[in-house]
Amino acid sequence: MAPRWRRLLAEGIGSAMLFATVIGSGIMAERLAGGNLAVALLGNTVATGAMLFVLVAMFGPVSGAHFNPAVSVVAAARNDLGWGDAGLYAVVQLGCGIVGVWIAHAMFGEPILQISTHARTGIGQWTGEAVATFGLVLTILGTVRHRPEWVPAGVALYIVAAYWFTSSTSFANPAITVARSLSNSFAGIRPADVVPFVLAQFAGAGFGALAGGLLFGPHPSDMRSA
């Protein structure tokens, strides 16, 4: 396992790059799509999936490339990561992810500090978030256990698909949900809608971990080096 400082640095840089991609591609897509939301979502999807592939391939051997507190909690619950490290991962993921959001705003000449007014609420969207996070965790556990070389592609392809088959467009990440509340852009979410999303995500992650244990066995999946 890499030293803690190196793992935290990987999680921080990766989270900043991922969150900047989600927000930046959303701004670019909205500007270029001419009001066509399907085209805007497609642009946002492709950029996010491509960046996920690169980041997981690059940082997976260093930190596990979680970039997601729900994934870090699952790793800790499976004894692949210490609980203290999981807490540090989550702090770095959120803090550096917010910096990534601000960088995206700066790149596109937007106000750095924003609050989203984009409503995302209701049982349908909460269910979508639970399903999205369930599938993400299951994808990670399955590929890490049986085809570790497929983890980057599996995660990226799953998120690309989940953008389109879930009603919530698959945030599937508590840190990015909070960070997106700080961007009044295509990818934003109202602060008032954040808590139900995060609860749904952790519930989905828990069920994903349970299903992964039943399907792929109880042994640690070594998510430290996903």
Image: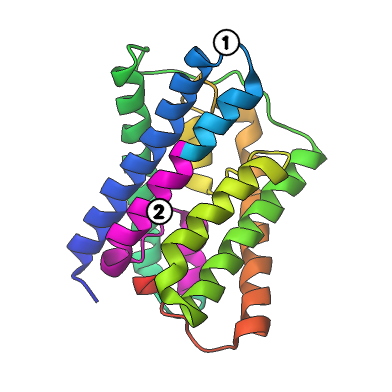
* Left or right: 213 in relation to 54: right
Name the image quarter holding residue 157: bottom right
Figure quadrant of the N terminus = bottom left
The main secondary structure of the magenta stretch is helix
Task: Decide whether residue 69 is among the magenta residues.
Answer: yes
Please say if 38 is above or below 49. Answer: above
Q: Which amino acid does label 2 sit on?
A: Phe
Q: Nearer the viewer, residue 2 or 26?
A: 26
Q: Nearer the viewer, residue 190 or 170?
A: 170
Can see residue 178? yes
Q: On the image, numbered disc 1 is attached to which residue?
A: 34
Q: Give the range drawn in magenta.
A: 47-76
Name the image quarter holding residue 7: bottom left
Q: What element carries label 1?
A: loop
Residue 121 position within the rendered picture, expressed as x and y whole percent measured from the top left: 73, 32
Q: On the image, numbered disc 2 is attached to which residue?
A: 53
Can see residue 189? no
Figure quadrant of the C terminus = bottom left
Local crowd size for mark 1, using a 10 Å CA cut-off: few (<14), some (14–19), many (≥20): few
Local crowd size for mark 2, using a 10 Å CA cut-off: few (<14), some (14–19), many (≥20): some
Name the image quarter holding residue 51: top left
